[in-house]
Image (cartoon, coloured by chain):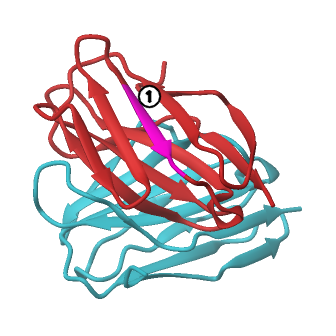
Chain colours: A cyan, B red
Amino acid sequence: EADIYQTPRYLVIGTGKKITLECSQTMGHDKMYWYQQDPGMELHLIHYSYGVNSTEKGDLSSESTVSRIRTEHFPLTLESARPSHTSQYLCASSPNRVQETQYFGPGTRLLVL
Amino acid sequence: SQQGEEDPQALSIQEGENATMNCSYKTSINNLQWYRQNSGRGLVHLILIRSNEREKHSGRLRVTLDTSKKSSSLLITASRAADTASYFCATGRGGSARQLTFGSGTQLTVLP
């Protein structure tokens, strides 16, 4: 089991609410990632970070934002949730080496009503 | 279009049989990785094969890589019901050392 954690595991929320999905890792990894995955589908990279104060948008356009104030935390925020945001969100981290293994958290299943 | 595409999309076999999944990709890679995902969970890394390797083993897993055909295969031998999961290949993008692109996965069901 990787030392990477996500909370909450499940979230059901109404349209228009602000939400923050938490991700933390205790492995000291510089690189962290957020993926969005619909059931039975591929993962889409929505945000990544190479270190503190570094964040970039991924391939899939997302209305979410991220921050990286500390190495171990990489929270994702949706200012105003919509039903189209319903999905599974997976956080991952990797050491600062070329294309090495990514370690995934258990994911957060988000349902926006 | 996505970098990695798995084939088949779904596979159902009996316990004890071998399962083979294939992955094709489009651009040059440094390595190719296979991950497993149990339903509703995160992904777990299984094996990494570098572009200068042709075959790699890990327990009941055997991975091959053919860079000339831009394809890889994952073989699970003597499958068990606990192997039931989705399997994804992931490739680093050509020229980029930092990100992985995942395919859509193969859903493997091993019947007891």
In the rendered image, which quarter is residue B4 located in?
top left
Which percent across, then down, holds residue A6? 53, 80
Vertical order, A82 against B63 (above or below): below
Q: Amino acid at mark 1?
A: Gly
Q: Secondary structure at mark 1?
A: loop
- Is residue A86 visible to us here? yes
Neighbor class of circle 1 (other Cα within 10 Å; few <14, some 14-19, many 20+) is many
Q: Is residue B75 magenta?
A: yes
Left or right: B8 in relation to A112: left
Which percent across, then down, holds residue A93? 32, 67
In the rendered image, which quarter is residue A8 located in?
bottom right
Q: Residue at x 54, y 35 (%)?
A: B20
Q: Main secondary structure of the magenta part?
A: strand
Left or right: B98 in relation to A66: left
Q: Which residue was labeled with disc 1?
A: B4
Name the residue furthest bottom.
A26
Q: Which residues are magenta?
A: B72-77
In the rendered image, which quarter is residue B85 located in?
bottom right
Seen from the viewer's position, the closer of residues B46 and A6 is B46
Seen from the viewer's position, the closer of residues B78 and B72 is B78
